[in-house]
Image (cartoon, grey):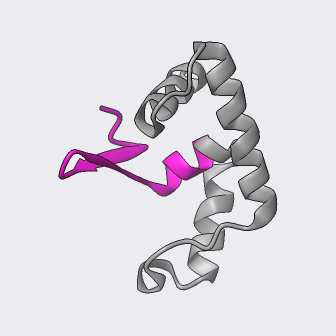
Amino acid sequence: MNDKYYSLIDGEPMISLDGMALLMDLPADTVRAKWQRQGGPDAGSLKVPEPWVKRGRRVRKEVAAALGYEPSLKESIDYLAAKAAP
């Protein structure tokens, strides 16, 4: 498990802001700043802008093409984290 990008709660991955950034190919600071502007922890969740959604779709397609199948969210994060590792 990659604690920086998600944690498992009742067996389901809960994505961190770093994980969201990874899935949308964005700098983590950009995602954090947007979350803070939307109210941070008090907001409950992040309202994702449409351009970011499009980026996420592109990343999902790239990961699926690289792996040869449609991966789960956890598998996608693990793949992207390994790819981003120095």
- 86 vs 51: above or below: above
Is residue 69 among the parts visible in the rendering? Answer: yes
Find residue 73 and report its horizontal and vertical position in percent. Answer: 47, 39
Q: Indicate left or right for 50 with 16 as reference.
A: right
In reply to whether residue 14 is colored magenta, the answer given is yes
Q: Which residues are magenta?
A: 1-22
Find residue 22 and report its horizontal and vertical position in percent. Answer: 59, 41
Query: Residue at coordinates 60% horizontally, 82% vertically from top-left?
Result: 38
- 26 vs 32: above or below: above
Is residue 86 among the parts visible in the rendering? Answer: no
Quadrant in the rendering for residue 60: top right
Find residue 54 and report its horizontal and vertical position in percent. Answer: 78, 51
Q: Nearer the viewer, residue 27 or 6?
A: 6
Quadrant in the rendering for residue 83: top right
Find residue 64 and report its horizontal and vertical position in percent. Answer: 63, 24
Residue at the extreme left: 10
Q: Nearer the viewer, residue 18 or 29?
A: 18
Query: Residue at coordinates 74% horizontally, 67% vertically from top-left?
Result: 49
Residue at the extreme front: 69
Quarter containing the N terminus: top left
Query: Residue at coordinates 43% horizontally, 43% vertically from top-left?
Result: 5
- 6 vs 36: above or below: above
Q: Nearer the viewer, residue 54 or 24?
A: 54
Residue at the extreme right: 51
